Image (cartoon, grey):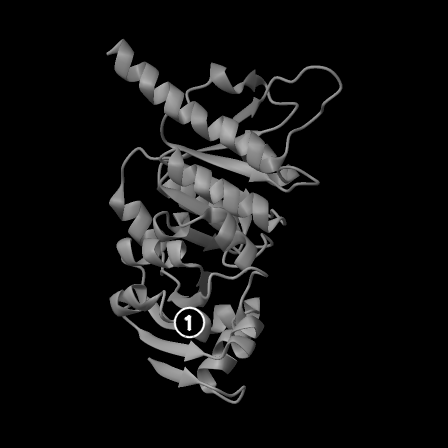
Amino acid sequence: MIEITSKNNQVYKLFQKLQTKKYRDKQELYLIEGENLIQEALSEGAIIQKTVISRSCAHRLKDTAEKLNGDVFVAEDSLFKNIAQTKTSQGVIAAVRRPVVSPEDIVGSGGPGNFVVLDRLQDPGNIGTIIRTADAAGYDLVIAVKGTADVFSPKTVRAAAGSLFRIPVLFVDTEEELLRFTRAAGKKLTAASPSGSRYYYEEDLSRDIALIVGNEGNGVSRSLMEKADMKIRIPMSGTIESLNASVAAAILMYETVRAKGKSKIDM
């Protein structure tokens, strides 16, 4: 393992710069921290470019370091804490290559799978939780509309808990681009709203939908709502008007699981 003993070290500078979205986008890299997440990255075939281990944890993480397919560095603890993303770090952080996802690849792969669309969500915890839930519910793709907070921010990566290694994320700049893509892929644009015409369980959400999860404060944009093929709502009692975005998304995505299970029983 290569030593990092100075703030002038180029790898140290790289990891500091990767704390910012602008530099993550430029380098097409993002950071993951913790032994469990790195082990999961390895098992899922993620491309780990560089890894930094704190000196006090180097012996404990020796076996993990031997499995890594990129450059491995050991940093003095005083330097490592400056690039760590958590207060109680596990002593290891890695720079991972962002996967490249193209609309052509997704459309060409076909299949009746479902997509989830992030419509300008801002909370990293919500975004990461939705990605994790989409993975668990068997969704095939996450689409992030421009204006959505950074999918590869440290908080989002932690909340996604490894799902970013398994479920692809496609970025679209405009609603028109989103519509062209979902139409080409044969998906029904599905929006949830308190004014939705039908309850979600009255519609077939088992296949071929692109489920829009709206901004935490404003919900699904008016223009996307107008263009949606299905407008659904979640029943609520009392004076509650809406649910947390990730909670609502989980309810709707797991309707896919329920509906698929029911169709198998009916067969």
Q: Is residue 92 above or below residue 111?
A: below
From the image, which quarter does the C terminus lie in? top left
| Residue 119 visible in the shown view | no
Q: Is 99 on the left-hand or right-hand side of 240?
A: left
From the image, which quarter does the N terminus lie in? bottom left
Residue nearest the viewer, comparing 60 with 162 = 60
**Image quadrant where residue 94 sits:** bottom left
Residue shown at 35%/65% (left/top)?
61
Question: Where residue 263 sits: x, y (%)?
Answer: 30, 16
Which residue extends farthest right?
Answer: 239
Residue shown at 31%/60% (left/top)?
46
Near mark 1 (Cα within 10 A), the count class, few <14, some 14-19 or many ≥20, is many
Question: Where residue 242 sits: x, y (%)?
Answer: 67, 28
Question: Where residue 110 sits: x, y (%)?
Answer: 27, 41
**Image quadrant where residue 185 sits:** top left
Residue type at mark 1 is: Ile
Residue shown at 45%/42% (left/top)?
132
Q: Which residue is mark 1?
A: 53
Q: Is 104 on the left-hand or right-hand side of 91?
A: left
Total number of numbered discs in the rendering: 1
